[in-house]
Image: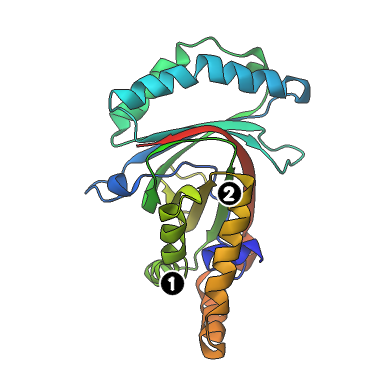
Amino acid sequence: MHRFTRFASLAGLALIALLPLATAAAAQEASPPFTYVAEWTIARDQWQGYTEWGAKNHKPILERLAADGTLLDWGFYETYVHELEGNTHGMWWSAASLANIEKTRAALLKAPFHPAAAAGAHRDWLLRPMAGGSKPGATAGGFLYVNMQEVRAGQGEAWEKFFEKYSKPVLEELVAKGVLAGWAVHYEDVHTAPNSMRFVVTVSNSPEAEDQADAAFGAARAKLSDAERSEYMRLARELTVPESHRDYLARISAAWYK
């Protein structure tokens, strides 16, 4: 089962800058919540120590802010498929307001700073969700899969309908079954890429769950008639820019959803 069909796009739906998933309840708010993503490039010999440091110094802060209602979700991840100059570690947190995003950022900045993070490259993302769903609770050991692709000019509404028809029902079923901890479709609130970029994210609960998710999308596509499959492929070509497609895969070391 090719991963690109998971998100109903011929070339996949491009790398969604690693980002967290908004909860179903949050996605239904009149004003969509925010997701803040912070990523670092950590030296190879510091990888294990950095993950342990984050669990000791940052995780308790996020747990406290989740408990008092400040956060909707949060997570830590480690890059699985590395690039020469790509990030190696990241974290996210989501909140219903920018004030709570900043409250969390300020709290995290008061924690000790890891020397390896200061020495490596760093970047941030500020995102808003178009749609999403999650199952309340904590997870670890699964995968963060981010898929990003540019939607062709004037095709945003058509692409959204395309996604809702072919991918959203499968994603909702996978969350209901506990295969996925969550999923979301994001766009950037502060643009660092074309504003036509759409980011699709899934967080699975285990490596086995990734296989189950691929199998579920394969089964859904297999049910299409020849005419429906032809229409699916035509729309995928016409609604997105295939060469814009990028993917990102990371392991989740810890995550939580409200």
Residue at image location 56% in from the left, 85% down from the top:
230
Indicate whether 100 appears above or below 234: above
Question: What residue is pinned by disc 2?
Answer: 145
Mark yes or no: residue 38 visible.
no
Question: Residue visible at 69% across and 25% down?
Answer: 42
Depth check: 201 or 186 in front? Answer: 201
Name the foreground residue: 150 vs 219: 219
User: Where residue 116 sits in the image (x, y, percent)?
Assistant: 67, 17
Circle 1 sits on which residue?
Answer: 162
Judged from this view, the residue extending furthest toward the left is 30
Residue 26 appears in the picture as rendered: yes
Q: Residue pushed farthest bottom?
A: 227
Q: Amino acid at mark 2?
A: Tyr
Choose top left, top right, bottom left or bottom right for residue 56: top right
Tell which circle, 1 or 2, labels the residue nearer the N-terminal end: 2
User: Tag 2, which secondary structure?
Assistant: strand
What separation in Å lies between label 1 and label 2 (alpha carbons)? 20 Å
Residue at 24% x, 47% y is 29
